[in-house]
Amino acid sequence: QVQLVESGGGLVQEGGSLRLSCLASGSIFSFNAIGWFRQAPGKQRDWVATITRGDETNYPDSVKGRFTISRDNAKNTVWLQMNSLKTEDTAVYYCRALLTSGWSSWGQGTQVTVSS
């Protein structure tokens, strides 16, 4: 079973930046895609970014132009660079891998808090 561990969260002021990391237990090159998701208190979990095996990236309008997803196959790591952070970006952020058998399990996530 693939395991992914998120890290890099923290407290940042509005307008600031953070870079989140997602370290996989296996080769990410074999994954069909990797996605970042987030869940704010009292809200549903939302999709934030996706990168495919072919390095195609996609974002919802809420983060497009501010967030960038990238990958390093040699390090089995996917990053989420978050710039121009807003208070509404406050959430627990999770990464998941899309395997041939479906999406991997949810991990512990990493907390991002943006203060005004």
Image (cartoon, grey):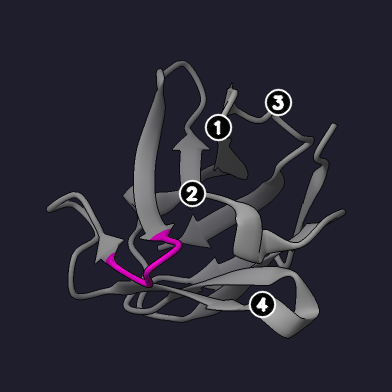
Residue 114 visible: yes
Q: Earlier in the sequence, mark 2 or mark 4?
A: 2
* Residue linked to disc 4: 73
Q: Residue at x 59, y 54 (%)?
A: 112
Q: Which residues are magenta?
A: 52-56
Residue 87 numbered mark, or none:
none
State the separation of the CA atoms marked 1 and 2: 7 Å
Instruction: Measure the alpha-carbon separation of dots 3 and 1.
Output: 14 Å
Q: Earlier in the sequence, mark 3 or mark 1?
A: 1
Q: Disc 1, disc 4: CB below 8 Å?
A: no
What whole-number distance in Å separates the C-alpha atoms at marks 1 and 4? 18 Å
The percent coordinates of residue 36 (x first, y second) are 49, 49
| Res 32 label | 2
Q: Which residue is mark 3?
A: 105
The answer to which of marks 1 and 4 sits earlier in the sequence is 4
**Marks 3/2: CA distance?**
15 Å
Residue type highlighted by circle 2: Asn
Determine contact: label 1, label 2, CB under 8 Å.
Answer: yes
Which residue is denoted by mark 1 in the rendering?
A: 100
Q: Residues within 10 Å of mark 2 (few under 14, many from 20)?
A: some
